[in-house]
Amino acid sequence: MVGNVPIKEFDGSKQTKFFDALKNTQFSGQFLLEDPTGQKWIFYLYLGRLLYATGGVHPVRRWFRNLGAYCPHIDRPTLREMTTLSDNEAKSLAGCWEYELLRLWVETKQITREQAAQIIRAMVCEILFDVTQASQVIFLTETTTPLKQQLVFLDTRTLVANVEKQWLGWQKAKVADRLPNQAPIIKNLEQLRQQTSPASYQALVRLLNGTYTLRDIALNRKRDIVDIITLLLPYVQAGIVELHDVHDLPIPIHNLPQAAIKPPEVSFSENDLNIPLIACIDDSPAVCQAMEKILTSAKFRFIAIQNPLRAITTLLARKPDLVFLDLVMPDTNGYEICAQLRKTSLFRDTPIIILTGNDGVIDRVRAKVVGSSDFLAKPVNAETVLSVVYKHLKYSDKMSKSTVVG
C-alpha cells in the first residue's frame, strides 16, 4: 500500500501522468482519493488499466442518471423488475454493486456491453471533473482482488482530455466556484415571473425545484452543463435562484450485502483540527510561500490558493478561520471575492485581511465597504502578519503566544 500523499490541484496533466505511471507498473487494485471535505472516490484498475470508478457525494444518483441516458428502454417498472434480485444474485454483487449489476445485466442480455461501457465512461468523466475541481486530494493505492469481469478498459488519456476541456469551459464561464452536484431551487417566484416569458417561467418552475442537480438538468434537457449554469447564473447572482446540496438517492436493491455497499475503509492522517486554519489567496507563488513559512512556523495550519477562480470553492470546502486576500489578481480581484464571501452565512464573521502593494486611502475605504476586516501592505513580514492574526482570532485566549511562537 502506498498512501497519504497530498496533491494540490490534481488537474488533467497530473491525472494523465499518474494513470500512465499506474499503467507502466501494471497495477491491479484500488486507487483511492479524498479531498479536504472528506469526500472519497475509488478507482478500480486491472494491470494498470482503468475499469471503473465510484464514490463522491452522489454515486447512486450518478448511476441512475447515466443509466437513463444510455438505456432509455429501461423505464421504472422494468428497472424495478431488473433490480428485484434473488438472494444468490444479490450475493454475487459482493464488490461494487453498481458495476456488478451492470455486469449481471450484460450476462443476462438485458443491456449490451456497449451500453454498459457508455454508462461507465460517462460516470468516470463526472468523477474526474469533481476531482479536478477539488483544491487538493490525498491518494493511496491498495492491492485487492480485481472486479470479476472487465466490461471495458478505459482510455484515461481521452477521458482526462475531455474532462479538462469541460473544466476550461467551466472556468471560462466564471463558474469555477459552483458545484455541478448542487441543485437549483427558486427562492423568489414572483421576481422570476417578472423576468421571464410565461413558457420559460413554467419550464424553470418544473426543473428548479431543488430536487434535480445541475447535472440532472443538463442530461434531461440534452444540453451541455456549462450552458445550463451560464443560463442560471444571472438568477443565482440576483438571489432569485439558489444552489444547495441534496442527498443521494437510495440504493435500488433491498437485499444487497453490506460488503457491496460500504466502501473500503481508508485512514488519512489529518492535522489537529483544533488549530486555526488560515488561507491565503494570492496568485504570487512567492507571497504564498512567504505566508506559509510565517504561519506554519507559528504552528498554524495553512492553505495557499493561487488560482482565484478556485477560491470560493476551496474556502467553502476547507472553512478557514481567517483569510488573507490579495487585492489584484487575474480574472477577478479581492474586492469581488470579499463581497461574495460576505454574502454567505459561513463567512459572514470570518476575518478577511486584504493584502496589497498599494496602501492607499481609496483602497482602504473600498476594502472596508465590501466587508474586509483589516488591511495589510506588501511586502509582508512575520511580525505584522502574526500581529494581525492574533488580533482577529483573539488567539491568546485559546493558546498562549509562547506556545504558538515557540
Image (cartoon, rainbow, N blue to C red):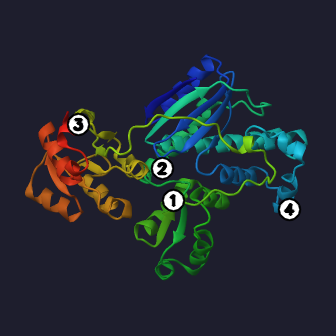
Kindly identify the amino acid type of the residue bearing the numbered disc 4. Answer: Pro
Q: Left or right: where does residue 164 sit relative to residue 218?
A: left
Q: What residue is rendered at 65% in x and 23% in y?
A: 48
The answer to whether the residue labelled 2 contacts the one labelled 3, judged by CB atoms less than 8 Å apart, is no
Kindly identify the amino acid type of the residue bearing the numbered disc 2. Answer: Trp
Residue of label 2: 170
What is the spatial separation of the Cα atoms under label 1 and label 3, in whole angstroms?
42 Å
Q: What residue is rendered at 22% in x and 58% in y?
A: 372
Kindly identify the amino acid type of the residue bearing the numbered disc 3. Answer: Ala
Q: Position of residue 208 (x, y in %)?
A: 57, 69
* Quadrant (top left, top right, bottom left, bottom right) of the C terminus: top left
Which callout, 4 or 1, points to the residue nearer the camera?
4
Which callout, 4 or 3, points to the residue nearer the camera?
3
Vertical side of 71 occupied by 282: above or below: above
Residue of label 4: 77
Q: Left or right: where does residue 265 sit relative to residue 97?
A: left
Tag 3 or tag 4, which sits nearer the N-term? 4
